Amino acid sequence: MKPKSYPCLKCGKTVLEMYPNRKKTSDEKKMWQYGIVFQMTAGYGSAHDGYVFNAALCDECIDSGVDEGNIKFIMDYIHGGKYIPLKGDNK
């Protein structure tokens, strides 16, 4: 089975599904290479009230979004502690 992919919302780079042959799982709960795929829901007041969307951001755009203050880092639920931007081989 061919892996799914999403373009990054900011730069258009490909965020690629890591394990396409796994059981059916919603996209935002799958593992993705080079970024994250997430679900957005629109609430009252939006022209898109009631809509649900999936979108992606690549790792580099996540880092720049945190640096610029456009993305709020909340926590690291695996390791705990502070936000650590990608460096060197991790990019």
Image (cartoon, rainbow, N blue to C red):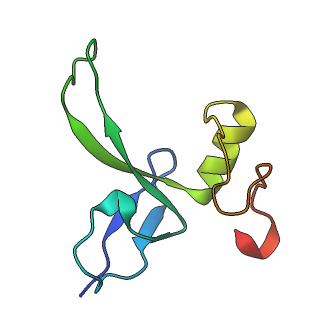
Reply above or below: 20 against 71. Answer: below
Total numbered labels: 0
Which residue sits at x=76%, y=76%?
89
**Which residue occupies the extreme top position in the image?**
45
Q: Where is residue 57 shown, x and y percent of the image? A: 50, 52
Left or right, 78 with respect to 17, comes to right
Reply above or below: 57 against 14. Answer: above
Which of the 4 image quadrants contains residue 48?
Answer: top left
Q: Quadrant of the N terminus?
A: bottom left
Which residue sits at x=30%, y=72%?
4
Left or right, 24 with respect to 56, comes to left
Q: Where is residue 64 shown, x and y percent of the image? A: 69, 44
Which residue sits at x=27%, y=62%?
26
Q: Quadrant of the C terminus?
A: bottom right
Reply above or below: 78 against 75. Answer: below
Which residue sits at x=27%, y=84%?
2
Q: Nearer the viewer, residue 77 or 37?
A: 77
Q: Where is residue 70 shown, x and y percent of the image? A: 62, 31
**Which residue occupies the extreme left position in the image?**
50
Left or right, 58 with respect to 15, comes to right
